[in-house]
Amino acid sequence: MGPISAPQPVGSRVVAPDPSITSAIGRHHTLVTAVADLVDNSIDAGATNVLVRFLVHGARPVGLRVVDDASGMDSSDIDHAMTYARKRDYDGKDLGHFGIGLKAASLSQANTLIVWSRKYGSPAVGRRLRRDTLDTGPLVEEFSSSDAAESLAGAGVDFAMDTGTIVEWQDVQTFLTSSSDEDQAAWTTKTIQDLINHLGLVLHRILERGELTLNIDIYDVWLDFPGPPRPVRAIDPFAYRGIGQPGYPKVLPVAVGGTSGTARLHVWPQHDKGLGFVLGGRSGTETQGLYIYRNDRLLQAGGWNGLATPNVDLVFARMSFDLTVEMERHVTINPEKVGTTFDDELRGAFVRARTVDGTTLASFREDAKRAAKVARQRVASPIEAPKPGDGLAAPVREAFSTHTEPNDAFPIDIRWRVLPESQVYDIDVDRHELVLNARYRTAIVGRKSLDRNDAPLVKSLLLLLLEDHFIGTGSGARKKREDAAWQGVMLAAIQAQSADGV
C-alpha cells in the first residue's frame, strides 16, 4: 500500500468574528485595573496631569471620569480609539499593548462610555459607546463639536486643557449597590485608597521621575463642586531603608533565544516593614517574587511564574525584571496588566543564569530563607509609631524613619481644618489623616501661620500619643476614654496658653 496523500484545500474565505465576542473582552478587569488602563492611555498620549474623578450625588457615586491634558484626539483618532477591530501602532515605548484598553476597561465596568477630546489645531470631538450594542456590533455615536467643546470647557480641573481628553463612565455596574449613605461613603473611601495603592505601585517609576501629577478627587454633581484632591504617590517595592542583605542587590543576566535581559535580585532587610514592603496591606506570600516591568510600568507585583513556590520562608525575596521588545515573545502579558506567564525557554534561562559571583536563583532563595530565619529569631521588639506624611518637614519624617518602625502601611498626613470647639484634634482613619483644629492654630504654633509644616513638636507628640489609634489594635471603648481625656487636657492647656497672651 502506497503512502497516503494528505487532502488539500480547494478554496478559502475570511470568516468575520461574531460581534458578541466583544462583550467578553475585559471581563477580568477590576475597577482599579480598569482605571489604571485609562491612565496608561493618558500617559502614552503625553499627559503631565491626570485626574481620576468620582462623580457623586450626596454619598452615592454615580459616575467616573479620567481627565488629562495630553495631546488629545481629532475625529480620525477618536474613531480609531472607539473601534474594536483596530489595533493602533505602538512605538515600543508606550504602556498600551493590546489596542483595546479604552473599550475593554471601560465597558467591563460601565454600561456607557463617553469620550470628549481636543487635539491641537482640530475641533473638539465626542463619541459614545453603549455596552448593549456590543452583541449586535458596537455602535459608536457621534456628538457635535459644540457639545464636545462645551464638555471640555466644563471639565472643572485645576490644570490647563488646551488639548486633552475626558473619558467618562456612566451607569457603572461595579459601584456599590446599597441604600445606606454610610455604606456608600465607606465604599468610595476604600475604593479611592485601593486606587491610590494600585496606581502608586504600578506607576511608581513614572511618578518618581516627576513628569506626571496624578490625583483622585470626589465631585458632588448636585453642588457642582469638587472635594480636595488626593495625590497618588509612588510606592516603590524596592525602596527599603538602610542596607539590605550583605552583597545584595545583585545583577542576574538572563539570556534566551538570542536576546538577553537583566534581573536584579533583592533580599529585603528584615527590620523594614514600611509601605514599600507591605504594598497596601498585602501579605508576604503575595509580595515575594518577580516584579516585571515594561517601559517602566509594573505589570506584575509578586509571584514566581513557575520558578518557585510561594512560602513564608521567601517573604524577603524580590526580583525586578525589565522586559525588552525582543524578550516579549517569551512572555504572555495578562490583558488587564496584572500578571504575566513565562514560556519554558525563559524559565529555563532563569534557572541557568548566574551573577558575576556565581549566585543562582536557587542560592538566592536560600539567602532569602536565611534572612527570614534570622528575622524570626529576633527578640527585641521594635519601637512602633505611625509613619508621618504631609504636615511635617523632611528632617522630622526622617527622624521617625530612623528611630521607629511604622505600625501602619500608610503615611499619616497632618492637616489643619476647622473642628468643633470641644476638639483639639480628630482622627480620620479611612483617609489616614490627623486633623488639627484650625481654631487653635495660633495658640499651638505660637503665632499666626500658614506653613503646612508648622508646630512640629506638637504634631510629633500627637502622632506618638495616638500611635494605636491609627490601627486596629486595642479596645475601642478604651480608645474612646483616652480620646476624651486627652482632648480635655489639651483643650485646657490651649486655654491656659491663650490666657498667657499667646
Image (spheres, helix red, strand yellow):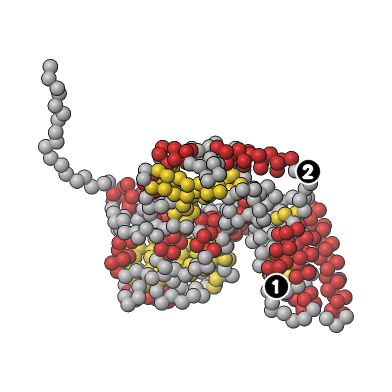
Q: Is residue 154 above or below residue 142?
A: below
Q: Is residue 404 visible?
A: yes
* Left or right side of 364 for 428: right
Q: Which residue is pictured at 70% across the width and 64% down the height?
A: 397
Secondary element under disc 1, as helix, strand or loop, is loop
Residue 426 position in % (x across, y down): 73, 65
> CB of mark 2 within 8 Å of CB of mark 1?
no
Secondary element under disc 2, as helix, strand or loop, is loop
Three-letter residue code for mark 2? Val
Q: Mark 2: few, some, or many residues within 10 Å (few <14, many ≥20)?
A: few
Mark closer to the observer (2, 1): 2
Residue pointed to by mark 2? 379
Which of the two discs, 2 and 1, labels the residue nearer the N terminus? 2
Residue pointed to by mark 1? 453
Q: Nearer the viewer, residue 37 or 333?
A: 333
Residue 60 occupies which quadrant of the picture? bottom right
Residue 440 position in % (x across, y down): 77, 75
Q: Nearer the viewer, residue 70 or 500?
A: 70
Name the quadrant of the N terminus. top left
Residue 210 position in % (x across, y down): 53, 68
Residue 82 position in % (x across, y down): 33, 60
* Left or right side of 330 for 405: right
* Left or right side of 237 for 500: right
Q: Is residue 350 above or below residue 395?
A: above
Q: Which residue is pictured at 50% across the width and 48% down the height?
A: 263
Residue 147 occupies which quadrant of the picture? bottom left
